[in-house]
Image (cartoon, rainbow, N blue to C red):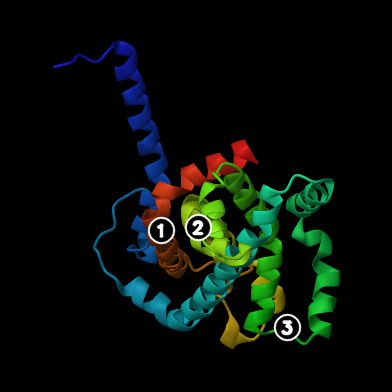
Amino acid sequence: MRTKSPRYAMLEIGLIALAVLFMIPLYFVVSMTFKSPEEMAGFPLSLPGSLSFGNYAETWAMMRFPLVFANTLLITVSTVALLIIFGSMAAYPLARKSSKTYNFLYIYFIAGIMVPFQLAMVPLYRFVNALSLVNTYHGAILIYTAINLPLTVFLFTGFLKSTSRELEEAAWIDGCSKFRAYWVAVFPIIKPATATVAVLCSLSTWNDFLIPLLFLQDSSRRTITIELYMFVGEHVTNWSLLFPGMVLSVLPLLLVYLFLQKYIIKGIAAGSVKG
């Protein structure tokens, strides 16, 4: 059996210690969901007295979780779908062409990453309100799509630059148009970039607080983050309901990440190195 070197053993111990350190906040949040207000007032890292799911049941009812979950899911899935379709289509010619016009368009898209949303918040609200898109799902979806499009184009362009042109050229020879050749020959090979876009844009959309607060003021169209905020008061915060709500809101994203994790690092690396 191969003996581990002292340096390798120390590195392994350090990584294990780092993993345990990162697990402490997760343990803290999950354990607090089972505690009564009296237990929360005691030592925060202590184990709960019992594994009662009463806090979850009360949070589920108070948040109207099925409704807000459906709202958040609809907005997130629709946004990610639009970003994958239009973002990849916009990135394809930017990755394949090298003229000054396409280089300018690429820089124009990338510049959007550096512009904070808060800078355009007031004129955007006036514009959306003039179009009667406030308190509508499609209004929020279009806003999220526009905000995340620069990052999407950046990732797809970088990954497409690293792919071979042989498959699409073969599709052209077989009689496919450029549009059909892209969807048949190119899009299936950019799964890592697609998975990266799906995860990153899902995170930013699902966890966003400001846009639903401004543009989805109707109680029937609230998202999870807005409903969580009702547990936070000016003087008192209902921790026994806030922590279960946080866990319920994170679980869907965790499942998506676990399903797509093998593509994420590959897609980010290709987009940043080749772009």
- CA neighbours of label 2 inside 10 A, class few (<14), some (14 to 19), many (20+): some
Label 1 SS: helix
| Residue at x 48%, y 43% (from the top left corner) | 265
Q: Total of numbered circles in the picture?
A: 3
**Quarter holding residue 131:** bottom right
Q: Which residue is mark 3?
A: 134
In which quadrant of the rendered view does residue 132 lie?
bottom right
Q: Secondary structure at mark 3?
A: loop
Query: Is residue 108 shown left or right of residue 245?
Result: right
Locate residue 224, reporting x and y percent. Answer: 52, 72
Q: Answer with mark 1 or mark 3, whichever residue precedes in sequence.
A: 3
Q: Residues within 10 Å of mark 1 (few under 14, many from 20)?
A: few
> For the N terminus, which image quadrant?
top left
- In which quadrant is the C terminus drawn? top right
Q: Position of residue 52 (x, y in %)?
A: 26, 69
Q: CA distance from mark 1 to mark 2?
A: 31 Å
Type of amino acid under label 1: Leu
Would you call the spot at circle 3 few (<14 residues within 10 Å), some (14-19), or many (20 or more)?
Answer: many
Q: Nearer the viewer, residue 71 or 259?
A: 259
Residue 16 placement: quadrant: top left
Q: Amino acid at mark 3?
A: Val
The answer to whether any part of residue 147 appears in the image is: yes
Q: Nearer the viewer, mark 1 or mark 2?
A: 2
Q: Separation of disc 2 and disc 3 at Cα?
A: 40 Å
Q: Which residue is mark 2?
A: 185
Residue 238 in percent (x, y) is at 49, 69
Tell me whether the residue at label 2 lies in contact with that at label 3, contact meaning CB atoms closer than 8 angstroms.
no
Q: Earlier in the sequence, mark 2 or mark 3?
A: 3
What residue do we see at 35% from left, 37% from top?
A: 20
Q: Residue at x 18, y 15 (%)?
A: 2
For disc 1, the marked residue is 254
